[in-house]
C-alpha cells in the first residue's frame, strides 16, 4: 500500500466532504470526475457498480468513499477515504450548528437557508447525471425507469410485477 495513494484519497475526499450539502448524493458527480477522469483509479462502469453497491447497502450514501478507497488501496485506502469524507464535514457541521443556535434572529441565517437549497438540489441532479453517464444508460433504461416510477406512484400495480416485466423486457433486448 502506497502512502501517496492514501494521501491522494484523502486529498480527493476531504474537499468533497466540505461541499456535500444535501448529503452524499450531492457530491457524486465530482467524485466520479475525480476518481474516473482525473486519477483514473477505475472506469466509469466500475464506478457505477460501486455506486450501485453503496446505494443497495444499508448506511449512508457516502459509503461509496470506503468502497473506492478499498478498490484503490485496500483496507488502508478504505479507512483513509472514510475518515476524509466524514471528519471535515463533521467538524464544519459542529461549528455551524453552534453558530446557528447562537444567531436565531440573524438575517444571514435566512439568507443561507434560501441560498443553499438550490445549490443542494443542483448538486444532487448533477450526481444523478454523472451516474447515468458512467453506467452508459440509454434511452430504453430511462424510458422504463420513468414508466416504472409512474406505475408505482399512480397505480396499484405490484412493484414485483413491474420488476418482473422490466426484467423480461431487458432480457428480451439482450437476446435480440
Image: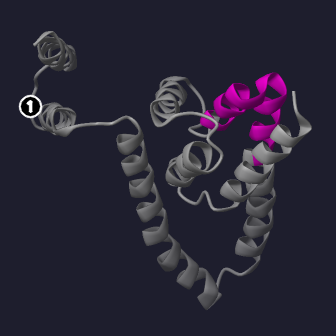
The single residue placed furthest to the bottom in the displayed view is 107
**Image spot of residue 12 (x, y percent):** 71, 51
Q: Residue 118's quadrant in the figure?
A: bottom left
Residue at image coords 61%, 41%: 40
49 in relation to 26, above or below: above
Q: For the C terminus, which image quadrant? A: top left
Residue at image coords 81%, 39%: 5
| Foreground pick, 128 / 6 | 6
Residue 96 can be seen in this image: yes
Name the residue that disc number 1 marks: 155
**Image spot of residue 21 (x, y percent):** 58, 60
Could you tell me how many numbered marks the image carries?
1
The single residue placed furthest to the right in the displayed view is 3
Q: Which residues are magenta?
A: 64-84
Residue 24 can be seen in this image: no
**Image spot of residue 166 (x, y percent):** 16, 20
| Foreground pick, 134 / 25 | 134
Residue at image coords 48%, 69%: 119
Q: Secondary structure at mark 1?
A: loop
Residue at image coords 42%, 64%: 122
Q: Residue 17's quadrant in the figure?
A: bottom right
The answer to whether 38 appears left or right of 89 in the picture is left
Q: Main secondary structure of the magenta part?
A: helix
Q: For the N terminus, which image quadrant? A: top right
The answer to whether 7 appears left or right of 16 in the picture is right
The answer to whether 98 appears left or right of 18 in the picture is right
77 in relation to 18, above or below: above
Disc 1 residue crowd, few under 14, some 14–19, many 20+, Cα 10 Å: few
Amino acid at each position: 500500500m502506497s502512502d501517496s495513494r492514501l494521501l491522494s484519497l484523502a486529498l480527493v475526499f476531504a474537499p468533497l466532504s466540505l461541499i456535500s450539502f444535501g448529503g452524499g448524493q450531492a457530491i457524486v458527480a465530482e467524485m466520479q470526475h475525480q476518481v474516473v477522469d482525473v486519477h483514473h483509479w477505475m472506469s466509469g462502469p466500475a464506478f457505477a457498480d460501486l455506486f450501485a453497491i453503496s446505494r443497495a447497502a444499508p448506511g449512508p450514501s457516502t459509503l461509496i468513499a470506503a468502497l473506492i478507497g478499498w478498490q484503490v488501496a485496500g483496507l488502508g485506502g478504505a479507512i483513509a477515504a472514510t475518515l476524509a469524507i466524514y471528519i471535515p464535514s463533521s467538524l464544519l457541521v459542529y461549528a455551524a450548528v453552534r453558530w446557528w443556535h447562537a444567531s436565531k434572529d440573524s438575517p444571514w441565517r435566512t439568507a443561507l437557508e434560501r441560498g443553499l437549497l438550490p445549490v443542494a438540489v443542483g448538486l444532487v441532479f448533477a450526481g444523478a447525471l454523472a451516474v447515468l453517464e458512467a453506467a452508459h444508460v440509454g434511452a430504453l433504461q430511462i424510458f422504463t425507469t420513468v414508466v416504472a416510477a409512474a406505475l408505482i406512484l399512480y397505480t396499484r400495480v405490484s412493484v414485483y410485477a413491474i420488476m418482473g416485466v422490466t426484467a423480461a423486457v431487458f432480457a428480451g433486448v439482450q437476446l435480440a
